[in-house]
Image (cartoon, coloured by chain):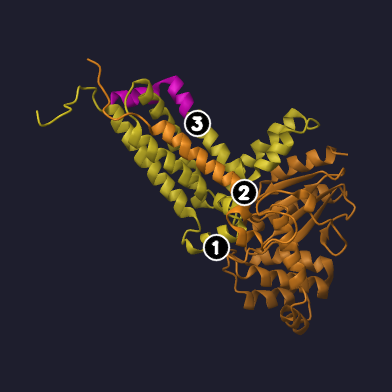
Chain colours: A yellow, B orange
């Protein structure tokens, strides 16, 4: 447990986790307007200040363009992804296995990303990938209109965090490899 | 003695491969949905693939459009909207604020086009027809009053009692109710609304509100979703500089 607390108190790890969380949050909120941002950033006639102002303003759409449910799991997924990333780096540096935790985490992040919405009505990432007609058709049969994927993402990331934290707190011992001896 | 891990750690490379495959599949399907969803891509008329932005296919603003403000404004905000979308409702308030700031001196015009998402909002297309009937019977001012009043009165997400609300708004706007009722069932605006819908998809719309901001030099910026006032204002300021 002391190892775990040490990771959260370590300034480099904390910065890394906060940075990852912010990157995850910003990606989720800015994703629906990626084409706009690319067109602004690649246009030399637009001043640098404007290139920064627009994405910063769009981050505010978490309040205007997401339902309470989707805004909640965007934030929770971002926080959990940051914690997961910090724990994985810590485990890798100590040479411990990260298999179960990181796998659940990766699946959780993907599930969460697929469920992000409603960033505009009908405009889930699922819709962007599958097309408006098919994406919207899938959404209609889901009681939470795609929110299920986000909730699944939160659950998987929660499980991943638990598995990784347990791995970190596990004492470093030489394990018996063959019980028949 | 150093502890040994019994299982080789393949998690990171496997995760990277899975991520790569998913991203590649997503990009492939996004850029050319017909590869995998041939049946669905055929539903789009014109040259646009589903979800791929091609703002060159934007239908130019014409007199028949619903235009609020100066039709010759330097910047035009074209909104593709769905009357049952709660984010369109919120964006309506944002655009009213934009128009009170930029519309009075004729710098910005707001154009409203229909993008009813039938799969999730079964009533939206009928409401779009009602708005067109309002424009026919009461003029352009009545269209905008219909839109504002509709958003004020209704809860969104297909929860609207259209049997009550549509005649109520028609009454409030002083429209001839029997003409309004017969217009609703006439089917005369079905083609126009479908053209709006197809154009929204052709230019890359996947949800509502889907907004295109057209600068004085013709450059177009897409803005997806019910964005906050600060984002719309920032983009309009950029567009105003593009002369």
Q: Is residue B137 magenta?
A: no
- Disc 1: which chain? A
Which part of the image, by quadrant, shows the N terminus of chain A? top left
Identify the image quadrant of residue B167: bottom right
Spatial separation of the CA atoms under disc 3 and disc 2 = 26 Å
Residue A137's disc number: 1
Q: Which residue is mark 2?
A: B30
Examine the rendered structure and indicate whether residue A98 appears above or below residue A119.
above
Looking at the image, the residue that sits furthest to the left is A181
Tell me the tag on residue A20. 3
**Circle 1 Cα neighbour tier, 10 Å, few/some/many (<14 / 14–19 / ≥20):** some
- Mark 1 vs 3: CB contact within 8 A: no
Of circles 3 and 2, the one toward us is: 2
Residue contact at pointers 3 and 2, CB within 8 angstroms: no
Q: Which residues are magenta?
A: A1-17
Q: Quadrant of the C terminus of chain A?
A: top left
Q: Decide whether residue A7 is among the magenta residues.
A: yes
Quick check: B101 left or right of A60? right
Q: Earlier in the sequence, mark 1 or mark 3?
A: 3
- Asked whether residue B45 appears in the rendered view, the answer is yes
């Amino acid at each position: 447990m002391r190892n775990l607390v040490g990771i959260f108190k370590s300034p480099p790890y904390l910065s890394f986790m906060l940075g990852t969380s912010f990157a995850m949050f910003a990606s989720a909120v800015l994703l629906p307007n990626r084409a706009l941002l690319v067109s602004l950033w690649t246009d030399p006639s637009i001043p640098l200040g404007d290139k920064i102002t627009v994405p910063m303003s769009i981050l505010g759409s978490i309040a205007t363009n997401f339902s309470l449910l989707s805004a909640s799991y965007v934030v929770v997924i971002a926080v959990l992804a940051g914690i997961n990333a910090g724990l994985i780096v810590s485990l890798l540096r100590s040479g411990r296995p990260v298999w179960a935790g990181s796998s659940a985490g990766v699946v959780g992040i993907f599930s969460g990303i697929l469920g992000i919405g409603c960033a505009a009505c009908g405009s889930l990432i699922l819709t962007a990938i599958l097309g408006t007609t098919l994406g919207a058709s899938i959404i209609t049969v889901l009681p939470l209109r795609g929110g299920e994927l986000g909730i699944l993402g939160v659950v998987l990331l929660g499980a991943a965090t638990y598995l990784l934290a347990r791995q970190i707190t596990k004492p470093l011992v030489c394990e018996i490899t063959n019980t028949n001896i | 003695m150093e502890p040994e891990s019994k299982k080789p750690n393949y998690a990171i490379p496997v995760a990277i491969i899975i991520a790569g495959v998913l991203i590649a599949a997503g990009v492939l399907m996004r850029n050319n949905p017909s590869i995998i969803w041939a049946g669905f891509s055929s539903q789009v008329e014109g040259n646009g693939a589903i979800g791929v932005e091609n703002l060159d296919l934007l239908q130019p603003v014409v007199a028949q459009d619903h235009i609020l403000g100066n039709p010759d404004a330097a910047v035009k905000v074209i909104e593709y909207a769905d009357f049952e979308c709660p984010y369109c409702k919120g964006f309506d308030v944002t655009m009213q604020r934009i128009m009170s700031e930029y519309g009075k001196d004729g710098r910005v015009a707001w154009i409203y086009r229909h993008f009813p998402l039938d799969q999730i909002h079964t009533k939206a297309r009928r409401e779009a027809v009602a708005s067109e009937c309002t424009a026919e019977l009461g003029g352009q001012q009545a269209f905008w009053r219909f839109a504002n009043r509709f958003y004020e009165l209704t809860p969104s997400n297909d929860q609207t009692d259209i049997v009550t609300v549509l005649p109520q708004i028609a009454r409030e706007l002083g429209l001839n109710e029997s003409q309004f009722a017969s217009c609703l069932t006439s089917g005369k605006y079905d083609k126009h609304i479908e053209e709006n819908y197809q154009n929204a998809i052709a230019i890359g719309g996947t949800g509502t509100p889907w907004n295109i901001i057209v600068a004085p030099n013709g450059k177009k910026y897409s803005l997806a979703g019910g964005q906050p006032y600060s984002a719309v204002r920032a983009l309009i300021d950029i567009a105003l500089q593009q002369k």
